[in-house]
Image: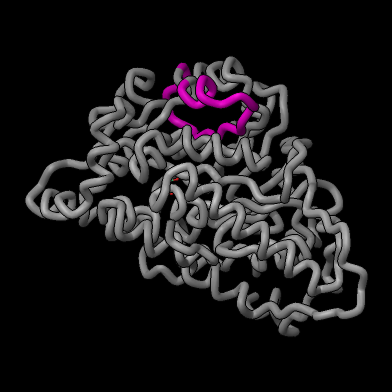
């Protein structure tokens, strides 16, 4: 077993093991990648305030997200195509999250279906919805999530149209991968991945194929999103979805204080401050930079989570200290999944947990719930540089 001390170690193993098409899918932003890069580099602008001679015994990272107890306030974000990063990937990630005690979010664009994941786990997970034009499909999707006892609904509000990611188009991204001379050459170097993949029947978009009408090429992500996603999604429609679901509703993809107020207005229980990992609007601000203004606007009225750019427990701590109640990780767990399956996701969670715990201690805090602005040192114009 290789020695893994940081998320970057998992990323190196992941890159070696998984076909280039799926590595590129995860490890990319839209257009120039500016927002993708700044999501991480903006965390580096924030410094931590060291405190000493504080009793550090009996620390706790336990918290709640959307009413659910968690070992640490870090949920697994909805990520499409996990079942292509590792065979049955969504089931593996859900199991790792369940054992670790953090929420797992299943994406509409998953390979394993809602029913598959429910059958192979024992605790409720969260389900993420994309809005498709096919209204019957949407109703059935909600019913399927209810029948699977999903404990929260995460509605993604920043992907009515797909941001352009050059590499996905150039690689001809599809699930399962199309065999072309260049993909065959690359697959030939990924034998362990391929052997695992041959042993599972789950190789298509499990929530879509056989369920959605009018999808002519459901293996191509760019084709079926362009054909099926509802570009007319608006706040009224989101309000309607709110009514369809009895449990907590989390709106993911809020990056502006005005939109945060609208989320509150339609009755969301929580929001995720997110720019979709820099995969949608390139040129948008990083999530962490937008967090302070969103906290000022709605922080005392709604639960705020943050994703995009988190690669360490220190990043988690910075988001919590700026006021987020919880965080989500996407790529950080995908690296682990691609590298080592379920064990890799567990390792990613362990790495982040340890970094969070030790950083918290060195900042002089014993409880994750006590973190606050007093633990940070920020450039004076951190939240105001662009106006
Ligand atoms: C889908 O959510 C994607 O970002 O590819």
Residue 382, by quadrant, is bottom right
Whether residue 144 sits left or right of residue 207 in the image: it is right
User: Is residue 260 in view?
Assistant: no
Q: Along the line of sight, which residue is nearer the eye, 93 or 278? A: 93
Residue under the image location 53 percent in, 66 percent down? 6
Whether residue 180 sits left or right of residue 118 in the image: it is left
Q: Residue furthest front?
A: 1
User: Is residue 254 in view?
Assistant: yes
Residue 373, by quadrant, is bottom right
Q: Is residue 125 above or below residue 316?
A: above
Q: Position of residue 317 (x, y in %)?
A: 72, 64
Q: Where is the N terminus found, in terms of image quarters?
A: bottom left
Whether residue 120 sits left or right of residue 165 in the image: it is right
Whether residue 342 sits left or right of residue 101 in the image: it is left
Does 123 appear in magenta? yes
Q: Position of residue 218 (x, y in %)?
A: 28, 31
Q: Position of residue 167 (x, y in %)?
A: 27, 59
Q: Is residue 278 above or below residue 133?
A: below
Residue under the image location 51 percent in, 51 percent down? 333
Residue under the image location 86 percent in, 52 percent down? 300
Q: Position of residue 71 (x, y in %)?
A: 73, 46
Does 35 appear in magenta? no
Q: Along the line of sight, which residue is nearer the eye, 71 or 126? A: 71
Q: Is residue 79 above or below residue 372?
A: above
Q: Is residue 158 above or below residue 44?
A: above
- In magenta, the rendered stretch is 116-136
Residue under the image location 61 percent in, 54 percent down? 350
Q: Where is the C terminus found, in terms of image quarters?
A: bottom right
Colour mapping used in the image:
one colour
């Amino acid at each position: 077993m290789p020695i893994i001390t940081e998320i970057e170690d998992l990323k190196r193993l992941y890159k070696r093991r998984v076909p280039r098409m799926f590595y590129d899918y995860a490890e990319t932003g839209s257009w120039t990648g500016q927002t993708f890069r700044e999501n991480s580099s903006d965390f580096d602008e924030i410094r931590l305030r060291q405190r000493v001679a504080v009793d550090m015994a009996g620390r706790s990272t336990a918290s709640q997200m959307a009413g659910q107890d968690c070992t640490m306030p870090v949920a697994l974000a909805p990520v499409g195509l996990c079942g292509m990063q590792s065979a049955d990937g969504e089931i593996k990630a859900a199991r790792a999250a369940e054992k670790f005690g953090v929420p797992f979010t299943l994406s509409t664009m998953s390979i394993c279906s809602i029913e598959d994941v429910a059958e192979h786990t024992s605790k409720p997970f969260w389900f993420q919805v994309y809005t498709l034009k096919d209204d019957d499909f949407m109703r059935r999707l909600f019913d399927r999530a209810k029948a699977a006892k999903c404990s929260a609904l995460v509605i993604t509000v920043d992907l009515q149209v797909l941001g352009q990611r050059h590499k996905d188009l150039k690689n001809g991204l599809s699930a399962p991968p199309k065999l072309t001379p260049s993909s065959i050459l690359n697959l030939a170097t990924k034998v362990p991945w391929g052997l695992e993949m041959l042993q599972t029947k789950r190789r298509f978009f499990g929530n879509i194929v056989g369920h959605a009408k009018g999808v002519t090429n459901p293996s191509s992500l760019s084709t079926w999103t362009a054909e099926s996603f509802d570009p007319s999604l608006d706040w009224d429609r989101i309000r309607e979805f709110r009514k369809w679901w009895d449990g907590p509703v989390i709106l993911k993809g809020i990056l502006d204080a005005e939109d945060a107020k609208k989320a509150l207005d339609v009755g969301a229980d929580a929001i995720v401050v997110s720019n979709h990992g820099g995969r949608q609007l390139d040129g948008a601000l990083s999530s962490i930079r937008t967090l302070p203004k969103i906290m000022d606007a709605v922080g005392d009225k709604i639960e705020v989570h943050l994703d995009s750019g988190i690669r360490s427990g220190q990043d988690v701590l910075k988001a919590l200290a700026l006021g987020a109640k919880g965080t989500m990780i996407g790529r950080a767990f995908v690296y682990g999944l691609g590298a080592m399956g379920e064990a890799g996701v567990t390792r990613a969670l362990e790495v982040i947990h340890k970094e969070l715990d030790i950083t918290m201690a060195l900042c002089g805090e014993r409880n994750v719930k006590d973190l606050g602005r007093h633990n940070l040192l920020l450039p004076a114009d951190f939240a105001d540089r662009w106006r």
